[in-house]
Image: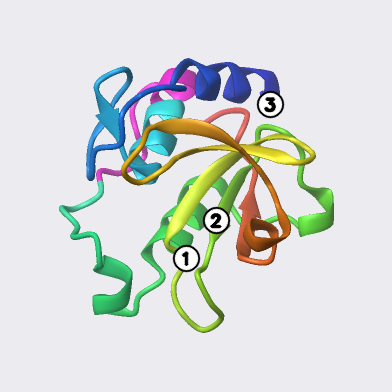
């Protein structure tokens, strides 16, 4: 499964950043990237997110990204057990909802939709690593 997730994620590289979009080569945000990868490997999405503003996490206070990942993928795995192909959720600071998502591509890199740019592969440097809120594994079957 990890190989399929990574292949799908790499197919999205270069897709422009577009808030709320999820169309390979056309545009996506970080959630749209994860949704697109899900469709590539499993078909229909488990749920369709409602419209959301860029400041959705700050306004609602609900951990919607975390909750959706848990519903679709099950409980988070230990950070020390993360492997390439796993979904990583990030919090900008403690006590606020997870706000960003990416796919671990190797032990020190991840693929994500970078705001005002595109889907890129970035180094998982300490400033990103310390913001990891949770790690989830794509299910084999849905």
Q: Is residue 136 visible?
A: yes
* CB-based contact (under 8 Å), mark 2 and mark 1: yes
> For the residue labelled by badge 3, is the local secondary structure a helix, a strand or a loop?
helix
Distance from disc 2 to disc 1, alpha carbons, whole Å, reads: 6 Å
**Image position, residue 135 (x, y; %):** 65, 53
Residue in the picture at 50% in, 31% down: 120
Give the magenta part as a residue range.
39-48
Q: Place residue 122 in its image quadrant.
A: top right
Instruction: Name the residue that disc number 2 marks.
Output: 89
Q: Secondary structure at mark 1?
A: loop
Report x, y in % for residue 57.
32, 70
Q: Main secondary structure of the magenta part?
A: loop
Q: Earlier in the sequence, mark 3 or mark 1?
A: 3
The circle drawn on residue 98 is: 1
Residue at image location 69% in from the left, 38% down from the top: 109
Q: Position of residue 92 (x, y in %)?
A: 50, 70
Spot the residue most to the right: 80
């Amino acid at each position: 499964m990890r190989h399929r997730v990574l292949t799908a994620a790499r197919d999205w590289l270069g897709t422009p950043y577009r808030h709320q979009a999820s169309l390979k080569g056309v545009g996506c945000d970080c959630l749209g990237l994860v949704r697109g990868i899900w469709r590539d490997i499993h078909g229909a999405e488990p749920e369709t997110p409602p419209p959301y503003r860029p400041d959705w996490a700050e306004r609602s206070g609900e951990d919607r990204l975390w909750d959706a990942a848990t519903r679709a993928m099950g409980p988070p795995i230990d950070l020390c057990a993360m492997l390439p192909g796993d979904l990583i959720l990030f919090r900008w600071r403690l006590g606020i909802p997870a706000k960003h998502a990416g796919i671990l591509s190797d032990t020190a890199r991840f693929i994500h939709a970078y705001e005002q740019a595109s889907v890129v592969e970035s180094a998982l440097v300490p400033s990103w690593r310390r913001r990891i809120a949770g790690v989830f594994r794509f299910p084999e079957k849905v």
